[in-house]
């Protein structure tokens, strides 16, 4: 039997490992305490306990993701064979290191996996949500604003996607058979164009007719957007596919160093596309509804009567006034996406089998032969997932409450 | 009213204090409020938004929500303190003893329940009667609120009824329990004027029939005058004056009440002679109330050191125990002093035609399903054959109720919609088919719009200054950002806002200030035409006057043509040169303001005039209540659009009203009406608004404009004392007659044939004669139409020779009497009359080289 630090030891060990997180949280609270008045609604969040709890939970995981290297004692993939299925709090007899949350079937440190898992979840979920929002906004605004045929067609497709069983959709998108076709890349390429398109139209409508400002803004948008697009798309599988198809010049273009500053793993790209594809219709419907409502306001008519173009009205008159509900929805949606990522991981879709993301870790934990004996392997990442989603929901609730109060 | 002394009041409120508890701490909403409502009495509670009138009502119902509380005082209902009642007792009192009617009828009805069920619920819960009995009661009460086909109504859902019908149902529901007190919180604000008139009459009748006491909350003084016995004026959480309608309307003793009356337009006031007197400053926010008198900072009679020294208590006025005012200086202020009008603007010269609309039609097609097509498409006929023209510096008012097509017309003019057929000419440019995105910046900036809702007119997400600058950018005005910035600041100066407002967000501005920014934005491109869509109707009364005056001042200085869309006839009378009345997409009457306000009317105009509540006790109105609702524009009635509700329909022979759309015909000079009635019937029409012939009061009415005095002094050389043909009246009535000249004229006309009084000329009044057997056709004189002829006949003028012999004094007297100057001179009436008197038509042709009219 291995030595164990006991419950108290686990708690103190846990608390001390997260020291950079506590430090940052304290700093944030000090700043907010002094600048509460200037922060508007975000300052007012701290008036309610729900808001404070939400912020703490969310920031806890954000800082954990940032400082994962410092917090986690081990690499999430390292196996320490002696620690296989070790009980939480066990001490590695060789190194004297404590496995706070025990070891899993493959003798990896569960604690380290949970900490590193936060990093994966907190990059993919917000990024995918953001892109889903840009897609949803770019399509939802014209659907609501113009109405008529455009609305009918876009809504029809949104409903089509929404009506398709999500898990089945993911299964299809990430099955090897489909991954070998062009479909994921076409979808990804298409979806990733939306942010650039969005900002292009945003600046174009604002500065049209004033070339001194228009040109630099548009140039910056196109360059930044294109660069990000190239980086996202420069996965090895896509390049291989391009080369196979004889489009070697595109392949070699994507192989340039500047387009490989940050990249995503082919599996992650698929997950990303799947998540964006599944949540964009939801955003679309919300934006469309908000547009229908805000469109009736006099300031929209005022903009029309001074000859503004539809896209200016949508992006500069309508959208800023829809921000409240959209921010709340974004918080909730990051939560959903987190769960979705967990679900995908649980089904073994997308992420590699070694990946420390929470869904995969829960799956690994639940596949242990005697789950009852080694419950911590699944419970630890599940608790992490739960607390993050809870934090996001509380944050959304508090934002909604505070924005309604006067 | 019965003797009050022996009765217990239905409702007695003593020193009520209500506060709301918010993040900013305790905010007193009602302070030191006392009032008594006797059995069968109707009490009006009047004040601007935010003055606490609705809070009082909710306080009475003990329904203040989570953050409101009664912090002091007593509310006694039938002598019992409501604070001592248990929750169950309160519940039975609410609904069965006190009923409340709210502003939005749709919000008071359960959309998922049939009307019948909702009505039957009341007696079933409160008096435990059976289903059958409840149904009978429901049927009975629906009949008593005069809804057609009660059984069908009971079977329908709320959304199947119109707004007016819904409000009747809400009233019926309130009456089901036979309450002793009915609280009406702005019950008609969401409704059209003609519908409002019906509801008001209904409430009055029902009050009498059931002997219910009423607490009537409104911001509309005219409405209170029509419905209530007593009135309580509130300002910033306090009652400032209470008394009977007569006391408060005629002998007001609080500066706020006085200022309120001076800031509302009364029919009869001319815009250039008597500008409205706006109350300076803004309504104080509840947590920023000044020390001492709340009205102090805005009061003309403010004395520093006294008015702001202590809280001011209600005081009785003289011996009248039931007339109270919250003012320290009741005894010191000269309440009869004349109003000093701030600036008497001169009238801008009316120029050339700027906008011409010819036979404009706008139909909308409403398709059932856009994606898959199919389904039947219906056509909404929003505008039918609209024709008019307006000139430079002119104000054309477009009047009509909701659904009459006035907003569609504005949209077509603005280019937000394109016309189905017809022409819109702006200058020489045809714009009916050019949508706004196809119009150049120059065209767009030439025609701009001021919107109705101040809380919606500015984008809440952008700075005020930025929004004006954006308009300048769009209109290609200014060379650089700095230049535009400067112009923006100048525009803020123009609308009398501090320049610092450029850096504010719209939410930091009050309603009136936002509307000013809206005006600045509309005038950014120096427009030729400004379409003002009910620009002040959503503002508080005291602010309305200031914004109206500002709008007119800018218009006068820039010689802008203004199309003023409104449903408020008082304000229209005050500011417009010409009026166009619309109904169901048709222009039914159009003409100069005075002519439209005087008979003969189009039947719809008559109803509209009679519906507008006037806050003046000396005005007598004829009641014309329209039955039914405005038909749908999808399925308009055949023939005349107004035939379904017209009370004159029986006077048109045959069924022409139902088969033929009438054509425009001139019923008075330049006054066109779309009606089948013939001249004889039109001549029978009596004026709707008349000045009551009351015994002269020693003191002038406080709301009598000083303009009158100015007119009198400037015309002292030619004292005018028209002797009313009907009854010898006093100088005051005479002065009033001048004010409401067209109305009086009309009255004269109506009575002219009955009493051809012969009276010796005094003070320049031309000699009158008895009606000769063969009176001359005065209409042959260019400039005299049938209406003027009637007026002249009323003065006892029947022959050309009479006109030909007028001396200067007489001419001026007639000028003043007819209320337009220069026409007699300009049209050379006397020269024409001389010629006609001498040799008839032949002589006329000889002198003028053309045939008389």
Image (spheres, coloured by chain):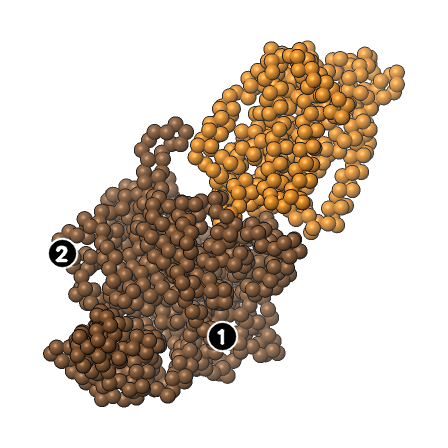
B342 vs B634, left or right, is: right
Which residue: 26% across, 59% down? B673
Q: Quadrant of residue B80?
A: bottom left
Residue B274 is situated, as x and y percent measured from the top left of the image, at 43, 74
Q: How many marks?
A: 2
Secondary-structure class at tag 2:
loop
Q: Nearer the viewer, residue B72 or A277?
A: A277
Q: Which of B35 and A165 is in front in this view?
A: A165
The first of marks 2 and 1 along the sequence is 1
Q: In which quarter of the image is the N terminus of chain A?
A: top right
| Relative vertical location of residue B48 with respect to residue B803 in this rendering, above or below | above
Q: Distance between the residues labelled 2 and 1?
A: 52 Å
Q: Name the residue under label 1.
A: B343
Which residue: 65% across, 53% down? B481
Q: Nearer the viewer, residue B138 or B249?
A: B249
Drawing shade for chain A: orange
Q: Disc number at residue A161?
A: none
Residue B344 is situated, as x and y percent measured from the top left of the image, at 47, 75
Secondary-structure class at tag 1:
loop
Circle 1 Cα neighbour tier, 10 Å, few/some/many (<14 / 14–19 / ≥20): few
Q: Quadrant of residue B513?
A: bottom right
Q: Is residue B643 visible?
A: yes
| Callout 2: chain | B
Which residue: 68% across, 36% down? A219
Residue B442 is situated, as x and y percent measured from the top left of the image, at 51, 52
Q: Mark 2 points at which residue?
A: B653
| Callout 1: chain | B
Drawing shade for chain B: brown
Q: Nearer the viewer, residue B362 or A165?
A: B362
Which residue: 75% across, 43% down? A29
């Amino acid at each position: 039997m291995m030595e164990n630090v006991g419950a108290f030891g686990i708690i103190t060990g846990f608390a001390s490992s997260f020291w950079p997180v506590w430090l940052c949280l304290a700093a944030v609270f000090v700043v907010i305490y002094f600048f509460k008045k200037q922060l508007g609604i975000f300052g007012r969040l701290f008036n309610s306990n729900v808001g404070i709890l939400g912020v703490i939970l969310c920031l806890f995981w954000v800082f954990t993701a940032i400082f994962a290297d410092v917090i986690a004692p081990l690499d999430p993939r390292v196996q320490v064979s002696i620690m296989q299925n070790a009980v939480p709090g066990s001490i590695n007899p060789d190194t004297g290191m404590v496995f706070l949350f025990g070891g899993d079937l493959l003798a990896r440190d569960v604690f380290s996996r949970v900490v590193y898992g936060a990093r994966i979840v907190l990059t993919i979920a917000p990024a995918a949500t953001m892109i889903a929002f840009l897609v949803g906004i770019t399509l939802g605004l014209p659907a609501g604003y113009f109405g008529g045929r455009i609305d009918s067609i876009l809504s029809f497709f949104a409903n089509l996607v929404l009506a398709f069983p999500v898990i089945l959709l993911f299964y299809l998108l990430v099955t090897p058979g489909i991954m070998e076709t062009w479909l994921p890349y076409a979808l990804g390429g298409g979806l990733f164009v939306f942010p650039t398109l969005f900002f292009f139209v945003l600046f174009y409508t604002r500065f049209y007719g004033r070339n001194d400002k228009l040109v630099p803004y548009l140039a910056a948008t196109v360059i930044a957007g294109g660069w990000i697009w190239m980086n996202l798309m420069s996965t090895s599988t896509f390049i291989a596919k391009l080369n196979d198809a004889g489009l070697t010049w595109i392949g070699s273009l994507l192989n340039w160093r500047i387009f490989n500053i940050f990249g995503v793993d082919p599996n992650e790209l698929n997950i990303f596309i799947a998540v964006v594809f599944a949540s964009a219709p939801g955003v679309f419907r919300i934006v469309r509804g908000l547009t229908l409502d805000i469109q009736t306001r006099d300031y929209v008519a005022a903009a029309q009567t001074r000859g503004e173009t539809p896209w200016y009205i949508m992006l500069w008159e309508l959208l800023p006034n829809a921000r409240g509900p959209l921010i709340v929805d974004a918080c909730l949606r990051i939560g959903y996406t987190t769960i979705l990522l967990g679900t995908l991981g649980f089904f073994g879709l997308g992420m590699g089998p070694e990946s420390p993301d929470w869904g995969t870790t829960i799956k690994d934990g639940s596949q242990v032969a005697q789950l009852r004996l080694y419950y911590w392997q699944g419970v630890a990442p599940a608790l992490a997932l739960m607390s993050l989603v809870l934090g996001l929901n509380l944050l959304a609730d508090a934002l909604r409450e505070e924005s309604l109060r006067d | 009213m019965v003797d009050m002394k022996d009765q217990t009041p239905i409702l007695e409120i003593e020193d009520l204090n209500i506060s709301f508890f918010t993040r900013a701490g305790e905010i007193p909403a009602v302070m030191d409020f006392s009032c008594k409502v006797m059995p069968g009495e109707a009490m009006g509670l009047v004040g601007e938004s935010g003055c606490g009138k609705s809070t009082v009502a909710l306080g009475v119902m003990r329904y203040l929500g989570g953050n409101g509380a009664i912090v002091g005082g007593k509310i006694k209902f039938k002598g019992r303190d409501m604070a001592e009642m248990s929750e169950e007792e309160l519940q039975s009192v609410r609904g069965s003893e006190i009923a409340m009617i709210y502003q939005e009828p749709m919000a008071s009805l359960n959309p998922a329940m049939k009307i019948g069920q909702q009505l039957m619920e009341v007696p079933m819960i409160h008096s435990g009667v059976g289903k059958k009995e409840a149904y009978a009661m429901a049927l009975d009460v629906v009949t008593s609120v005069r809804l057609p086909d009660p059984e069908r109504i009971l079977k329908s859902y709320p959304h199947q009824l119109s707004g007016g019908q819904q409000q009747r149902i809400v009233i019926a529901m309130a009456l089901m329990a036979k309450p002793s007190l009915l609280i009406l919180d702005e019950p008609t604000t969401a409704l059209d004027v003609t519908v409002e008139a019906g509801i008001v009459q209904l409430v009055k009748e029902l009050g009498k029939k059931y002997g219910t006491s009423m607490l009537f909350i409104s911001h509309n003084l005219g409405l209170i005058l029509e419905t209530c016995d007593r009135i309580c004026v509130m300002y910033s959480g306090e009652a400032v004056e209470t008394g009977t309608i007569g006391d408060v309307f005629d002998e007001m003793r609080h500066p706020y009440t006085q200022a309120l009356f001076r800031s509302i337009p009364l029919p009869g006031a001319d815009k250039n002679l008597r500008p409205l007197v706006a109350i300076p400053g803004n309504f104080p926010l509840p947590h920023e109330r000044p020390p001492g008198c709340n009205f102090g900072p805005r009061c003309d009679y403010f004395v520093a050191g006294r008015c702001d020294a202590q809280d001011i208590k209600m005081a009785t006025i003289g011996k009248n125990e039931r007339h109270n005012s919250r003012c320290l200086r009741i005894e010191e202020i000269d309440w009869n002093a004349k109003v000093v009008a701030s600036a008497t603007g001169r009238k801008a010269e009316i120029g050339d035609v700027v906008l011409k609309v010819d036979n404009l039609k706008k139909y909308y097609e409403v398709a059932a399903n856009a994606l898959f097509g199919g389904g039947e498409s219906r056509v909404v006929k929003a505008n039918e054959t609209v024709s008019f023209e307006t000139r430079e510096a002119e104000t054309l008012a477009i009047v009509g109720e909701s659904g009459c097509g006035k907003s569609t017309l504005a949209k077509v003019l603005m280019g937000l919609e394109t016309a189905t057929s017809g022409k819109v000419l702006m200058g020489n440019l045809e714009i009916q088919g050019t949508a706004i995105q196809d119009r150049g910046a120059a065209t767009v900036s030439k025609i701009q719009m001021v919107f109705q809702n101040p809380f919606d007119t500015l984008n809440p997400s952008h700075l005020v200054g930025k929004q004006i600058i954006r308009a300048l950018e769009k209109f290609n005005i200014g060379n650089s950002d700095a230049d535009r910035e400067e112009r923006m600041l100048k525009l803020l100066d123009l609308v009398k806002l501090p320049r610092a407002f450029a850096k504010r967000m719209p939410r930091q501005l009050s309603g009136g200030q936002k509307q000013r920014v809206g005006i600045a934005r509309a005038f950014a491109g120096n427009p030729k035409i400004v379409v003002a869509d009910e620009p002040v109707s959503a503002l508080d009364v005291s602010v309305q006057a200031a914004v109206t005056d500002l709008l007119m001042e800018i218009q006068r200085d820039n010689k802008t043509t203004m199309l003023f869309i409104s449903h408020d006839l008082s304000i229209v009378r005050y500011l417009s040169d010409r009026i166009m009345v619309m109904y169901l997409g048709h222009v039914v009457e159009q003409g100069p303001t005075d002519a439209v306000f005087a008979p003969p009317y189009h039947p719809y105009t008559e109803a509209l005039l009679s519906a507008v509540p006037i806050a003046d006790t000396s005005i007598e109105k004829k009641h014309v209540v329209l039955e039914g609702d405005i038909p749908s524009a999808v399925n308009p009635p055949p023939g005349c659009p107004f035939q379904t509700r017209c009370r004159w329909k029986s006077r048109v022979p045959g069924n022409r009203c139902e088969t033929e759309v009438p054509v425009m015909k001139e019923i008075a000079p330049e006054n066109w009406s779309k009606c089948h009635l013939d001249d004889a019937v039109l001549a029978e029409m009596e004026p709707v608004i008349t000045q009551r012939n009351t015994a002269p009061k020693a003191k002038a009415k406080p709301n009598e404009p000083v303009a009158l005095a100015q007119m009198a002094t400037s015309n002292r050389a030619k004292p005018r004392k028209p002797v009313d043909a009907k009854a010898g009246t006093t100088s005051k009535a005479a002065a009033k007659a001048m004010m409401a000249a067209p109305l009086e004229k009309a009255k004269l006309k109506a009575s002219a044939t009955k009493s051809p009084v012969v009276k010796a000329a005094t003070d320049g009044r031309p000699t009158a004669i008895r009606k000769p057997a063969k009176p001359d056709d005065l209409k042959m004189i260019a400039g005299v139409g049938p209406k003027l002829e009637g007026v002249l006949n009323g003065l006892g003028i029947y022959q050309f020779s009479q006109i030909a012999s007028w001396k200067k004094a007489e001419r001026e007297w007639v000028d003043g009497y007819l209320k337009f100057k220069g026409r007699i001179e300009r049209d050379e009436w006397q020269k024409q009359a001389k010629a006609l008197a001498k040799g008839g038509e032949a002589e006329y042709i000889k002198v003028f080289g053309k045939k008389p009219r």
